[in-house]
């Protein structure tokens, strides 16, 4: 390969690398923010639940609609990761979206449970609840949030490993 072709290929490779790095960093930042916001909402609901029956309520039940609106950048960033490639990194971004979705679903179930119990904390071990499906309390929400956080870390590891891939082959 001639010197001009090599320098052109190097410039293109650097451009691809920068595009990927920007997309990966944007997604990681949005994912960390999403996990943090879900955690904050879960903590607020947990405080609200634990203060049921007390004279003064602490915490509040957040609006899921507002939370979903604040999470829009995560989906946009995932699209940029998919466009930047390679596919293996995009699959990890999808896994992050899936675990964040699971955490949101559990948070929604927990909020519904807290709203349905105005006289006693649903996180109390003294409370027996009979339900058809799984019972989602604070500890289950916290577990899925932890899983989402771990998935973000895995995404970063895979993204770092494949930053310089060319058609799925490490550079």
Image: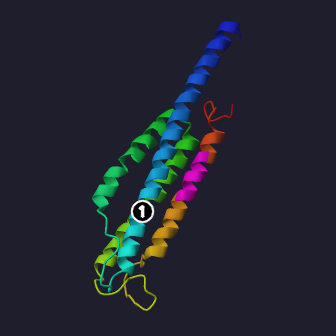
Q: Main secondary structure of the magenta part?
A: helix
Q: Is residue 95 magenta?
A: no
Lateral position of residue 163 relative to residue 76, left or right: right
Residue at screen point 31% across, 77% down: 57
Q: Percent position (x, y) of residue 2? A: 70, 7
Residue at screen point 42% across, 47% down: 74
Quadrant housing residue 13: top right
Lateral position of residue 32 relative to residue 60, left or right: right
Q: Which residues are magenta?
A: 149-156
> In terms of secondary structure, where does tag 1 sit?
helix
Q: Please tell me whether residue 139 is drawn above or below residue 55 in the rendered image.
A: above
**Label 1 sits on residue:** 40
Q: As rendered, which of 118 and 7 lies closer to the eye? A: 118
Q: Residues within 10 Å of mark 1 (few under 14, many from 20)?
A: few
Residue 40 appears anywhere in the view: yes
Q: Please tell me whether residue 34 is drawn above or below residue 22 in the rendered image.
A: below
Q: Is residue 153 magenta?
A: yes
Q: Percent position (x, y) of residue 26? A: 48, 40
Q: Percent position (x, y) of residue 133? A: 39, 78
Q: Please tell me whether residue 169 is drawn above or below residue 34 in the rendered image.
A: above
Q: Quadrant of the N terminus?
A: top right
């Amino acid at each position: 390969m001639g010197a001009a072709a090599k320098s052109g290929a190097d410039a293109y490779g650097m451009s691809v690398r920068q595009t990927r790095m920007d997309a990966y960093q944007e997604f990681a930042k949005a994912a960390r923010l999403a996990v943090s916001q879900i955690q904050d909402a879960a903590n607020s609901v947990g405080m609200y639940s634990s203060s049921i029956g007390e004279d003064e309520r602490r915490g509040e039940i957040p609006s899921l609609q507002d939370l979903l609106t604040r999470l829009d950048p995560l989906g946009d960033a995932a699209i940029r990761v998919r466009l930047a490639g390679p596919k293996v990194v995009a699959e990890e971004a999808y896994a992050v979206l899936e675990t964040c979705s699971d955490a949101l679903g559990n948070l929604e179930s927990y909020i519904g449970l807290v709203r349905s119990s105005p006289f006693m904390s649903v996180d109390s071990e003294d409370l027996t609840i009979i339900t058809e499906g799984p019972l989602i309390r604070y500890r289950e929400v916290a577990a899925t949030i932890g899983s989402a956080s771990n998935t973000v870390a895995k995404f970063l590891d895979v993204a770092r490993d494949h930053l310089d891939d060319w058609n799925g082959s490490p550079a």
